[in-house]
Structures are given as C-alpha cells and as structure tokens.
Amino acid sequence: MNELSVELLDQLSQIDLFAGLLTTEIQEILAYARPLTLQPDAYFFQQAAPAKALYILLEGQLKVTQLTPDGQQVVMRMVNSLEIFGCVAALSGGEYPASAQATKTCQAYALRQKDIQMLLPQYPKMAMNAFQIMVQRTHELQDRYRELATECVERRLAHAVLRLVDQSGREESDKIVLDMPLSRQDLAEMIGSTLYSVSRILSQWEGRGLVLAGREKLSVVKPDILSQIAEAQIFSADLKNAPI
C-alpha cells in the first residue's frame, strides 16, 4: 500500500478525479497505483499504444502531442503538477489518441485500467468525476478545433498563450512568467501553424511591449491586450500608434 503523507493527500483531494472523496478513500484507491519517475523527453505512453492506465502527475510537467495523418505534430495540451492525463482513453478503452512526453523530471502515479474498472463501482463519486472529466476534455477539443477552423494565426496564438498563463503562469514583478520550457516550435505545434509565423507574431508583440520572449521562455506583460487580440477586439497591427 502506498503510504501518502497528510499534505499529499490534501493536495490530491483537489484533483478533479478525487473531488468530494474522503482522504481515506483516496488512500484506498491509490493503494492500487504504481509510482513512476520519468526524466525529461521520456514518454509515459505513445500515440496508438493500448490504453492500459491513467496517470496522476504529482510533480513535473509534460506535453500531450498528436501526430496528424500528414505527419505534422500538434501539441494538444500541457499537463502540470496535480493533474491527470490519459484518462479518457483508459476509461473508454482502445488506444491512446496522443503521446505524453515529459518536459521536466516527473513523479507520477499510474492506475491500471483493470483496477479502475473495479474501483469505479465501489466509489460512485469518482465515477461521476470521471464522466465529467471526459465531458470537459471533449469540450476542450471542440474549442481547439473551432479555433483552428475559424481563427487567424494571431488569435490562435493569443488563446494558446492565455491558456498557458492560466495553467502555469507565475506573477513576477510587472509580468507573468510561464513556468515551463517553451520553444516557439512548441507554440507553433499548439496552434497548427509554422515556426516562421509564430516567430513573426511574437516579435511584433515583443516590439509593442506585450510579451518578453527568450530562448524557451515567455513572459506576458499585458495579458489584457492579449485577451482583446484573442477575442478579435483588436489586432497587434492596430497597436502601432495606440497608447498601451
């Protein structure tokens, strides 16, 4: 049985899958979990592999990527500490629709599919949470596809950066630092665009004081302006002579 500290159990109780469960119930569920440690660039699972487990990320960070039929890699989402991933595939069976690759050293728990199937009837609240997670992931995918189909590159990039701010932004002085290794290629893969287009837009944003872009680092200086760009209320070209 995995002996979990009171502090860790309290943190785990904030995860969507365990919302509303007693810490004793979480301890009982995680008695079936297998601890894992992965180094940066290692894979938890790869696209099209049988979905044998869902994962709970305790520490670290990873990216979920999908290879399209024409060979283009798309970053579907970034996963941070105290999030679950691989859950939709593990709960529904079949194959993983994407790959999960560590971007930092990761500590995680793996819950095997056969154990999940046994546990869900015993813990109805977890079963309901799992259903809600699947619905949420479906809505997220719908939003991403809508952006790809209807929005210009600049709007898609603004949406992506703002999502990352919500997930892992850290306030520092007069800016919000994205606490993750993040290249311009990663951003291009997130929004289905090219490295050239993303680099050009980031350079424009940086020249107008909206962001600070370094090597695999990005800080947001004016998130309110990015929000206006994301919602098509303004475009960066309109800021050239505007006081911001």
Image: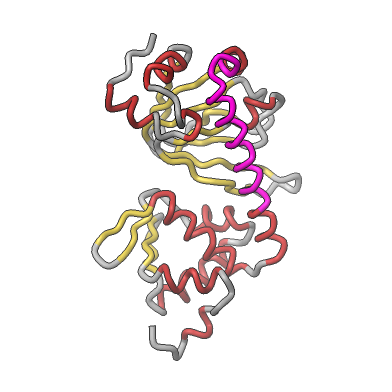
Q: Left or right: 81 with respect to 141? A: left
Asked whether 102 falls inside the magenta stretch, the response is: no
210 relative position to 114: left or right: left
Residue 144, percent from left and from top: 64, 54
Residue 139 counted in the magenta span: yes
Which span is picked out in magenta?
Answer: 119-142
Q: Is residue 103 visible?
A: no
Q: Residue at x 43, y 71 (%)?
A: 224
Q: Nearer the viewer, residue 139 or 98?
A: 139
Q: Which quarter of the image is occupied by the C terminus?
A: bottom left
**Farthest-out residue, top:** 1
> Relative to residue 177, is residue 45 drawn left or right?
right
Q: Main secondary structure of the magenta part?
A: helix
Q: Quadrant of residue 128?
A: top right
In-front residue for pair 200/157: 157
Identity of the residue furthest to the right in this view: 69
Q: Residue furthest bottom?
A: 241
